[in-house]
Image (cartoon, rainbow, N blue to C red):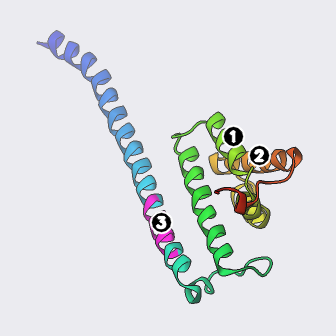
Amino acid sequence: MSEISQAYGAVSVPLSVAALAGVALSLFYQAQQTRIMRDERDRAVHREMVYLAIEDPKLAACWEPPDSPMTFDRYRQLMYVNLIMGRWNAAYRLGDIDEATLRSLLAQHFRGEIGRLHWAQARTGWLSINVGGRTGRSAEFAKIAEESYRSAIAVGPAVAANDYFR
């Protein structure tokens, strides 16, 4: 009997360690999923607020003013571009797009007047908020966006918004 109990004891220790590791892994995964869901909830609320401001100049005036005077239509375009950039940032952070894809998207984006205007006005905020001492994927995103913007500027003038469609 004592030999049987010792054999079970020797087998039960690795099983207990494996079970404990499984519980720890499950808790880690749940915490990560909770963070992702909270982040998406916050982004959904932000998007809804931006959509309301895009439709109503009185609500748009509740946000920070543009760096220079502009028409409400231009302000709406810049707010929309900020949503686009936020989406790409989230996709990059979550691993839905890789660095090469992000660089390709940004290269095309910064060919245009509105994309460049947005980054020229918003880059300080993006860089200080996302880079400011952090080394995560959001910081990488902001650095890649800045590099892409500078490369686009070096290539030449942007395609004017009026020339996009004929």
- The span picked out in magenta is 40-49
Is disc 1 surrounded by few (<14), some (14 to 19) or many (20+) residues within 10 Å?
some
The residue carrying mark 2 is: 148
Is disc 2 surrounded by few (<14), some (14 to 19) or many (20+) residues within 10 Å?
many
Residue positioned most to the bottom? 58
Which mark lies nearer to you, 1 or 3? Answer: 1
* Mark pair 2, 3: CA separation: 27 Å
**Magenta segment includes 125:** no
Q: Residue at x 73, y 45 (%)?
A: 144
Asked if residue 75 lies left or right of residue 159, the reply is left
Amino acid type, residue under disc 3 in the picture = Asp
Is disc 3 surrounded by few (<14), some (14 to 19) or many (20+) residues within 10 Å?
few
Observer-nearest residue: 11 or 117? 117
The residue carrying mark 1 is: 103
The image quadrant where one finds the C terminus is bottom right
Observer-nearest residue: 132 or 64? 64
Q: Residue at x 64, y 76 (%)?
A: 73
Amino acid type, residue under disc 2 in the picture = Ser
Observer-nearest residue: 38 or 9? 38
**Magenta segment includes 47:** yes
Q: Which mark is residue 42?
A: 3
